[in-house]
Image (tube, grey):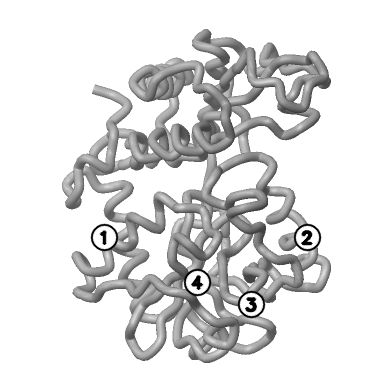
Amino acid sequence: MAKPRLLNMNGTIIRYEDARVHVLSTAMKYAASVYEAMRAYWSDADQQLYVFRLREHLQRLRRSAKIARIPLPADPARFERETLEVIRANDLHEDLHVRLIVFVDTDDGGLASREPVGYVIAPIPTTRYFETAGLHVAVSSWHRTADNAIPARVKAAANYQNSRLALLQAKTDGYDDAIMLNTDGSVAEGPGYTLFLVRDDQPMTPSVTSNILEGVTRSTLLALFPESLGVTVEQRQIDRTELYVADEAFFAGTAAEVTPILSVDRRPVGEGAMGPLTAKVRDAYFRAVRDGSAPHPEWRTPVYG
């Protein structure tokens, strides 16, 4: 990824080079931070930059902070305003990855320290996260963390050690990515993105009680499937072997967007190519994020004008 020229730190726009957190901060030592990763999409047709589902991301940040007992240093309205301001300050007119991190900034050495709390908003120019026609994935031997251990519905830095172990294992073993299971053997998600399957023309995805992040992209697709394709997504527990008999599969997330899965554990998914429902919902998704005339204008927050 490229680096932003300017970012917002604790309400002040500063140079990228001047952003500092102490190496002995609670955030550094104990991963005491929650965050949101958002996308902004440039529309050539509209000559506009849209932040996609900004308010929903900020709502999830509030929920993550509540569970993690990290007091938010600003309200959602301020975070929204400052997100748009720092994008404008950088004069960006391209696709972005926007990261908003809230972290415990004290260096008193205490595991239970809660204040002071700092934050940073960084708009980062980006391209597609997966520059590929599809992914070959493995079912990881690393289980997804449980809700009563490290809850997956909290978008926190600490959770990504679990995802990192699964992804590094998959790449070491020659795969592109991984799928994580729960301790009972049911399907959870990928390391940083939710998972959808299609069986006999029925799309399905693990329920929110399957130790998954309650994804903003996931909720977007749950709306787009019936609106654009006329089919409702089934949300339920999914068995591991259903991965092997699925007709289609794809990852979905702010970074992943809609990315087809071509094989699981060296077994082809369907014909080993992107399936028709995946292609249709992906087209609907990219229209939703980039086209100002698409349904759900409330999903797109314009940056300029």
Residue indicated by mark 2: 168
Observer-nearest residue: 203 or 304? 203
User: Which is closer to the viewer, label 3 or label 1?
Assistant: 3
Asked if 159 appears above or below 284 in the picture, the reply is above
Q: Secondary structure at mark 3?
A: loop
Q: Which mark is residue 56?
A: none
**Secondary structure type for disc 4:** strand
User: Tag 2 or tag 3, which sits nearer the N-term?
Assistant: 2
What residue is pinned by disc 3? Answer: 185
Q: Quadrant of the N terminus?
A: top right
Name the amino acid type tagged 4: Pro
Q: Is 35 situated above or below 90?
A: below
- Residue 179 visible? The answer is no
Read off the residue under disc 4: 260
Instruction: Tell me what residue is drawn at x 25 percent, y 43 percent.
Output: 45
Q: Which mark is residue 223?
A: 1
Q: Are marks 4 and 1 in contact (CB under 8 Å)?
A: no
